[in-house]
Amino acid sequence: MTFASLKDFLTRGAACLATGPVALLFVEDPVEIASTVLHHAGLGFREIVVFIPDAVPIPEEIAAAATWIRHDTLAKGAVAAAVNAVIVAAPAKTWIYYGHNAEYLFFPFCESRTVGEMLTFHAEERRDAMLAYVVDLYAPDLGRHPGGVSREEAMLDRSGYYALARPDPETGHPRERQLDFFGGLRWRFEEHVPKARRRIDRIALFRAAKGLTLRDDHTFNVEEYNTYACPWHHNLTAAVVSFRAAKALKANPGSSFDIPTFTWHGSVRFDWTSGQLMDLGLMEPGQWF
């Protein structure tokens, strides 16, 4: 089903949010829309809601696989505003994921376990949110793939990731169990990336709650949601493998001509498995085996 606007969806279609987990996908361009929807459908999301600009056509082959909402996803603050509207409309404790086209969620053992099973375990550990690292993917040959995207030959960085303490703006002291994570293309080409967009941490999975608000920097107004683990042991984390940075760096004239290749000595072929991401330390299985 397609809705003319977010308001139209909240008026007539919000009932589809009643049973989670729900995936919210924000389309920015026509790149890899179908593969993004099909990937998340394969993970076991009960409902997939796609926000898509008027100028981008809905791929016919997957039109029935999701709920579609016409929405200006490129407007300032559009993603956070839409996510917050869904939080208000969804029943409390509904699990929600949000990401973009050409981004693919992975979690430990996702080849054999559904996202619902994983989140049930996570909730049993008294966690209402899950940290994800946004791992940049890129094409190895920009001559053949000038847009920076190739699922068949996707590369990622196996090294170069680091974390810094996240200071509380009021006290200046580091916040407990919160870190700012960096790496990937945003680190290697940071001169082309605004400072506010260099972090690769995102609370991509979370439970709806009364008064909960997503901020534009991918953090929530409830600080416990922004933590990477509970106080007593390590928790599950996820990864969002993403062509979004590669697309932006090649689409922007200010950076496109300065970047002849994305590959470097730390590049490795992505094999599209959760095992590789765990081996590289890019997500954590916690106590889940």
Image: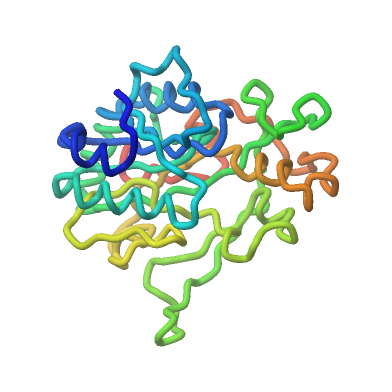
- Which of these two is toward me, 131 or 102? 102
Residue lying at 48% horizontally and 72% vertically, measured from the top left: 166
Q: Where is residue 212 in the image (x, y as percent from the top left)?
A: 25, 60
Asked where in the image residue 14 lies, by quadrant, the reply is top left
Q: Where is residue 97 in the image (x, y as percent from the top left)?
A: 34, 42
Q: Where is residue 182 in the image (x, y as percent from the top left)?
A: 59, 58
What is the quadrant of the N terminus in the image? top left
Above or below — where is 125 with respect to 101? below
Q: Where is residue 164 in the image (x, y as percent from the top left)?
A: 55, 68
- Which of these two is toward me, 124 or 100? 100
Above or below — where is 231 with respect to 26? below
What is the quadrant of the C terminus in the image? top left
Asked if residue 142 can be seen in this view, the reply is yes
Q: How many marks?
A: 0
Q: Which residue lies furthest to the bottom in this view?
A: 171
Asked where in the image residue 174 lies, by quadrant, the reply is bottom left
Above or below — where is 155 with respect to 258? above
Left or right, residue 208 beside residue 23: left
Residue lying at 60% horizontally and 37% vertically, measured from the top left: 243
Residue lying at 85% horizontally and 41% vertically, measured from the top left: 260
Q: Which colour scheme is used?
A: rainbow
Left or right, residue 30 beside residue 79: right
Asked if residue 114 can be seen in this view, the reply is no
